[in-house]
Amino acid sequence: MVEAIHNSETKNFKILSLPAEHFEIEKTIYQDISRKYRYVMCERDELTFDRLKRNIKKQKAKYFVGKTPSLYFGSIADIILNANKGEYSHLILDYCGQIGTFHEELRHTFRNDIIEVGGTLSLTFNKRITPGPSTLFCNTIDKLNTYQIPKGQDNGKTMRVIKTFINREGGYKYDIENIFEYLDNNDGAKKGAAMVLVVVRRIK
């Protein structure tokens, strides 16, 4: 994710992100990549948002000199659905949930090209598919995958759904640059949740 941003040639230097309370990725970008970026940070959990505000206030002199992040309390979909074409250089969407929950705002992202050419869209998802609306979405997308991703050449339904959805919605303008699977054990569980990070670049 950070490497993909480092390898980008963009003009707007504006990032939309889901930073959680410690904004570790944003710190890394500031320290290792560029201090030019301006951030719009979104959080919908009230307690996490309050902690984020306090941490930004304490550390902005170190990490955001002259560019205090804009903070938004609410759903990031509100920002995405109202964004202009090419408004953002990068989107860092650490959803951690299932792709079916977020497909509408992601579809809008692709179809309205809110990322500028050369920019990236970084997404993290949980690989589970639980009963509910997410299941219906995943089943529908999976049926569309046969001509793109043969079922013997990937490692599961969730991965087929992610790849197929991005390929169909992104079309020739977007390219999947990297996919990284990992286990998230931040909650202290012996076996972490199966997760996937997908980095997509707008190429046209």
Image (cartoon, rainbow, N blue to C red):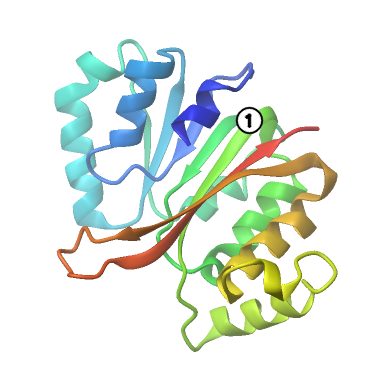
Give x and y (percent) for residue 60. 23, 20
Above or below, 142 relative to 79: below
Number of marks in picture: 1
Q: Quadrant of residue 97?
A: bottom left
Q: Nearer the viewer, residue 204 or 191?
A: 191
Q: Residues within 10 Å of mark 1 (few under 14, many from 20)?
A: many
Left/right placement of residue 99 relative to residue 22 reads right
Q: Nearer the viewer, residue 30 or 75?
A: 30
Give x and y (percent) for residue 69. 36, 27
Give x and y (percent) for residue 166. 69, 56
Left/right placement of residue 35 relative to residue 46 reads right
Q: Quadrant of residue 23?
A: top left
Q: Which residue is rendered at x = 76% and y = 80% of the image?
A: 143
Left/right placement of residue 177 relative to residue 171 reads left
Give x and y (percent) for residue 10. 63, 19
Q: Which residue is rendered at x = 35% and y = 56% of the image?
A: 44
Position of the C terminus by quadrant: top right
Query: Residue placed farthest to the bottom in the image?
Result: 131
Q: Which residue is rendered at x = 33% and y = 21% of the image?
A: 68
Mark 1 element type: strand
| Residue annotated with mark 1 | 119
Q: Nearer the viewer, residue 49 or 157?
A: 157
Query: Residue placed farthest to the front in the image?
Result: 152
Left/right placement of residue 155 relative to residue 181 reads right
Residue type at numbered disc 1: Gly
Above or below, 119 relative to 176: above
Q: Quadrant of residue 102?
A: bottom right
